[in-house]
Image (cartoon, rainbow, N blue to C red):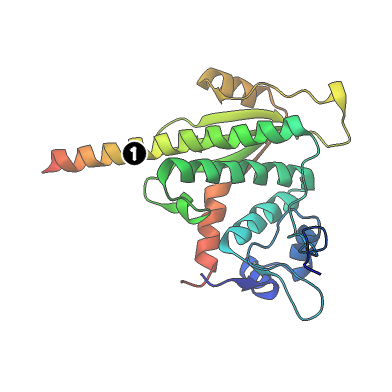
Amino acid sequence: MPPLTLTQSARALGVPPHKLIHLCEKRVVVPEVREARGRGSSREFSKRNLFEFAIALEMRRLELPVSYVQAVLRVFRAFEDEAKALLGTFALPDSLLVADAPRLSLVILDGERLYFSLTRDGEPPRVFGGVNIRHPRARGRARQHQSLGRLRPDQAEQALRAARTRTEVDLSRIAQDLGDRLPPP
Amino acid sequence: MTPTSSTVRAAKPVARRAKIPDPELRELLAHLGRLLAHEYVALLAQSRLAESAEKEQAR
């Protein structure tokens, strides 16, 4: 896919350009193709950037803090790098849409604990995480990271049942919708 | 005068993502990403094996 300008990206994502500019200026999303360098130059974005924008915009629509968006994108970068190392080739978002790919979702419990879940048709979800991503103003003992790893099904059910609130973002759906909105290569 | 490394003008740095200030959190998130990748790849491989087995049986 050829790189997209800010205007093209905003149109593809269905948002006003200033929302993307805000995410760039907060350095949540950094243009992979070209950064703006003053008069006469403008930002250009890759498909991966658009996926990052799409996730960020969805999370911001849910009024989740920018710090949470940064945390999720950090996970995604490590995820992509490791998957590429394991498979030889893997690139977000397209690789999430291959045949038989498990569905990937983000789950935030009680507004502060970050989980990811992988689901295949007809099977219970596999849940990972438990990272406490409270607002950065919390310091020291106020921030307690729970141990990470894959939760046993009973642990996952317990965590979900005990939560007062659950925010779930279907990341595979976001990748699918983005693919539908972008022009074919 | 031949320019030395101290006189060569440094290139303007490429914009970088804002760093998550808590290093422990950064590492936890990266670890979660790697864990997720291993599980994702394992599930993908299982699905593909199951599909191959089905096709083989159908023959």
Residue at left 79%, top 67%?
A18
Would residue A118 appear left or right of A115 to someone viewing this image? left
Residue positioned most to the front: B1
Residue A52 visible to an observer of this rendering: yes
Residue at left 64%, top 55%?
A52
Dot 1 falls on which chain? B
Would residue A86 appear left or right of B55 to someone viewing this image? right
Residue at left 68%, top 33%?
B27
Above-or-below relation of A154 to A106: above
Would residue B58 appear left or right of B1 to someone viewing this image? left
Q: Which residue is mark 1?
A: B47
Residue at left 81%, top 79%?
A39
- Name the residue type under label 1: Ser
The image position of residue A7, as x and y in percent, is 69, 75
The image position of residue A97, as x and y in percent, is 45, 53
Residue A65 visible to an observer of this rendering: no
Q: Quadrant of residue A122?
A: top left
Q: Quadrant of residue A41?
A: bottom right
Would residue A160 appear left or right of A36 to someone viewing this image? left
The image position of residue A51, as x and y in percent, is 60, 57
The one nearer the camera, A146 or A153, is: A146
Secondary-structure class at tag 1:
helix
The one nearer the camera, B3 or A3, is: B3
